[in-house]
Amino acid sequence: MAARLGARCLPPAWLCRQAWQGQGRHYRAALCTELKQPLTIQEVAPHPVRPQEVRIDVHFCGVNFADVLLCRGQYQEKLPLPFTPGLEFSGTVLETGADVNTVKKGDRVIGVSNFYAMAEQCVIDQKSLWKIPENVSLQDATVLPVSYGTAILALGHRARIQPGLAWEGRIVVLGFAGGNIASLPSNLLLLKNISAMGLYWSRYQHRDFAVFSKSISTALQYYQQGLIHPRIGAVFKLEKINDAFFHVMQRKSTGKVLLSLK
C-alpha cells in the first residue's frame, strides 16, 4: 500500500519508464479502489513468476463492457478491492517460469486474463497465452480473443450453425449490454421449434479449455486467411482509462476500444 500511495509523488519521467528496464521495478496499473468511482493509475510491485507462469510486457489491452460492469459492481463475478480490470491483452514475453515450454523471452503473444491486464505488466499461466503469427500486428491481435473468440464459440460450438438454420434453430444468449435482461417468450420456442441456450465464454477457460483455446486459435487462423478484419474504434493511453470507460458506456464506439500501454 505504501508503494501505491508513494507513486503519486514520483516524477512523471520515472512513472513512464518501461517495466522491463530492470528486474523488480514497479510498474503502472489501472486500479479500481472503490466501486462506481473513477479508476486511478498507480505504481504496483511486480508479482513473482511461478514455474508455469510467464511475465508479459503488455502493449495493448482490450476495453470490454465486462470491465465497466466489474468496476461498477454489476458483473456476475466479484473481485476484492482494489483490483485491476482487463480481460485480453497483447505483448511480448519478458520472463518465463522454470517449467514453461510453450513460449520464450521475446515472443509476441495474446492472452486472456482474469481481470488484471490493464497494466504495463502481467503474470499469467502459460496456458492462457497464444503466439501471434508474424503477419498479425499486436494491435489487431488484441481484438481477437473476447469478441471473435466469443462469436466463434457461440456460432460453431453452441449454435452449431448450418445451412437452413430457421427450422429447429438455436438462440444463443451472450449478455445484456443494452442494460436490461430480456425475457424470452417460451411459446415462441414451441411454435417455431427452436432452442435457447446461454454462453459464458470465459467459463470455458476453466471447464473445457480445449474448446476455449480452439476459439482463439480459430480467430487467429481466420485473420491470417483474410476472413475477418478487426475494426478498432478508438485507442486510449493507460492514463485515459476513465475516458475509455466513458466512451464505451456512452456507446460511442463503432469498433473495439483499446488501451495502449506504450
Image (tube, rainbow, N blue to C red):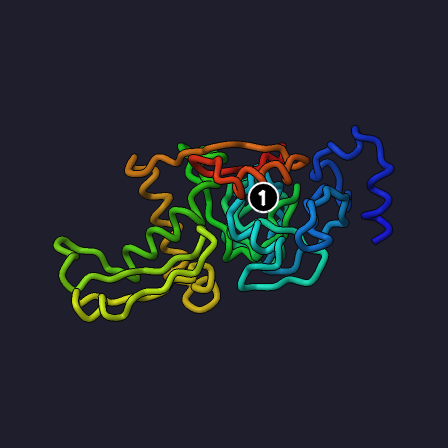
| 233 up-or-down from 128: above or below | above
Mark count: 1
Q: Residue at x 45, y 57 (%)?
A: 180
Q: Which quadrant is the C terminus positioned in? A: top right
Please give the residue where the numbered disc 1 appears in the rendered image: 93
Horizontal arrangement in the rendering, residue 218 relative to residue 138 (left or right): left
Can you give x and y, in whole percent of width and height, for residue 134 in the image?
43, 34
Instruction: Return the x and y of residue 142 as percentages of the image width and height.
Output: 48, 41
Front residue of this view, candidates 81 and 260? 81
Query: x, y percentage for residue 33?
Result: 73, 53
Callout 1 crowding tier (Cα within 10 Å): few <14, some 14–19, many ≥20: many
Which quadrant of the rendered structure holds the N terminus? bottom right
Q: Is residue 167 visible?
A: yes
Residue at x 58% of width, y 42% of height: 245
Taking depth in this image into account, of 179 and 20 the one nearest to the observer is 179
Query: Which residue is found at the position 43% from the left and 60% from the top?
Result: 181
Is residue 18 found left or right of 183 in the rendered image? right
| Residue 48 seen anywhere in this rendered image of the structure | no
Q: Amino acid at mark 1?
A: Val
Q: Position of residue 208 (x, y in %)?
A: 41, 67
